[in-house]
Amino acid sequence: MDKHMSREWALKLIFLLVVITLMIIGGLQLYTHRHYEMPIVTGPGVTKVVKLSEFSEGLKGTMADTDVFFLEGKEEGGKVFIMANTHANEPAALLASLILIENAVVEKGTLIIIPQFNHSASRNTRPGDGYPLYFEIPTEWGSKKFRMGNRDASPLDQWPDPDVYIHYPDKQLLSFIDVRNTNRTWPGRPNGPLMERVTHGAMQIMREENVDMAVDIHGAETMFPVTNCIVAPDKSVRIATMTSLTVKAREGFESHVEPSPSGFRGLSHREIGDYSETMPFLLEAPIPFLDQPTGPKTVKLLLDGKDPFLLSLSKKGKLFVPYDETGWSMEKRVGQHCSVVLELMQQFSRRLPEKKIEVRDVPRYAEVVKNGVGYYFHDPKKADKDKVILN
C-alpha cells in the first residue's frame, strides 16, 4: 500500500473514531437522562402512594407505570383527581402538582395526584429542537433538578407507530404520533397500545374512587388560540366559568373558558366527561418556550419566558395573551395553576356543599410569584427516607 493510500485510510479511521466517540457521548447523555430519578418529598397530607398499574395491570413492568399520590382528609367530602405532565415538555404542570404533594393538607375530601402522567414522555427528549435535558429550580437549600421531557412517549417504550392512529372506541382517524400522546388516547383500554393503558388506568381510578372532578394541567404556546384558559365540556362549564371570573376579579390574572369540542376525540376534557360521572377540566397557562419563532430553547427561556421575537410579535398583535418585557415566568405559570385548582375546588364545594373539599397550606398566585416556586420544595436530604419517592 503506497503512502497516499495509507494516509487516506488513516483519515477514514480517525473520522470513524470521532463519529463513534460522539455517538457514545450522546448516547450516555440520553441514557443518563432517561434513568435520572427525581426525588419527591411526600408532605404531611400524603396518606399513601401506589402505582397506576394497580388500576391497569398492563402497565406493570413498563416505563409507563407511574406513581399515584393520595391525600385523604379526616372527613369525607368530594374527590379531585389531578394529572400533570400529560405533556412532559410543559413542566409548570409538574411543579404545581409537586407543590400540592409536598405541602397540601386535606381537611375534608380527597386529592389524588399523578405528577408524571406520561412517565415515558418525562424520560424522552427532543434533541432535534435543541431541548435542554434538565432544568433547575432554585430553593432555600440549593437547587432542585428536573428532567425536561417531551410531548409524546418514547418510542423505546411504545413502537412502532401506526400509519394512522384509529381512536378507540370512536374510530376517528388521528395522526400516527397521537398514539404516544396521552391527551389523545382517552378513554383507553386495558389491552390497547401502552398509552391507552395509561388513560385506562386513570379512568379506572375515577370510576373506582368515585372521583367528582378531574383536572388535567397543561401549558400552551402564546401563539396558540387555546391558551391561558380552562377547557371544559357542558357538564363542567358552570364551575369553570365561576372559577374564571373569580380569579380575574380577586387575583388579577386572566384564565378564560374554552368549550370542549364534541367532534374531536381522545382528549381528557372530552372523554372523561363522556365515559364517567367525573367533571373534567383542562388548564392551559402560556409557555413561550414552546412557540416556534423564538430564540434558542434554553433553560433561561423556559424559566423566565422572555423572548425578543415574541415581544416583537406581541406589538403586532400576533399573540393570544398579553406579552411585554416581563415575559411569562415559571412563577406566574405555576402560581396560576395553583390558584385555578384551588378555586375549582371552592366553586365545586359551593355548588355541592355535601361534597365539600377543604385543603390548606397551598399557595396561590401572588404568593408563588413573590416567593418563587422553589420556596415550596423540601430538601430530600433532610427528609425521612420513607418520605422520599424517586420518580
Image (cartoon, grey):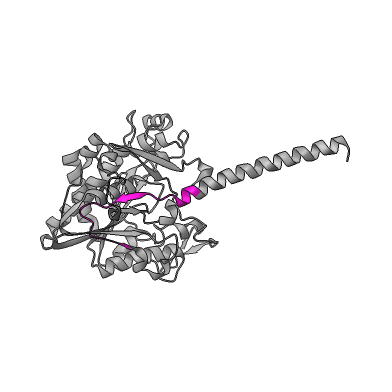
In the image, the segment drawn in magenta is 32-50
The image quarter containing residue 376 is top left
Residue 124 visible in this rendered orientation of the protein: no
Q: How many marks?
A: 0
Residue visible at 40% across and 56% down in the picture? 118
Relative image position of residue 120 (x, y in whole percent): 44, 56
Q: In this picture, is 123 found above or below 379?
A: below
Relative image position of residue 314 (x, y in whole percent): 37, 32
Relative image position of residue 257 (x, y in whole percent): 26, 49
Residue at the limit of the structure toward the right, as seen here: 2
Residue 203 visible in this rendered orientation of the protein: yes
The image quarter containing residue 152 is bottom left
The image quarter containing residue 48 is bottom left
Q: Quadrant of the N terminus?
A: top right
Residue at the limit of the structure toward the left, as seen here: 353
Relative image position of residue 235 (x, y in whole percent): 24, 61
Residue visible at 35% across and 34% down in the picture? 304
Q: Which residue is more in the foreground, 177 or 27?
A: 27
Q: Which residue is more in the foreground, 325 or 197?
A: 197
Residue visible at 42% across and 45% down in the picture? 148
Q: In this picture, is 111 found above or below 13?
A: below
* Residue 72 as seen in the image, left or right of residue 122: left
* Residue 102 as seen in the image, left or right of residue 299: left
Q: Does the magenta run of residues contain 96? A: no
Q: Does the magenta run of residues contain 42? A: yes
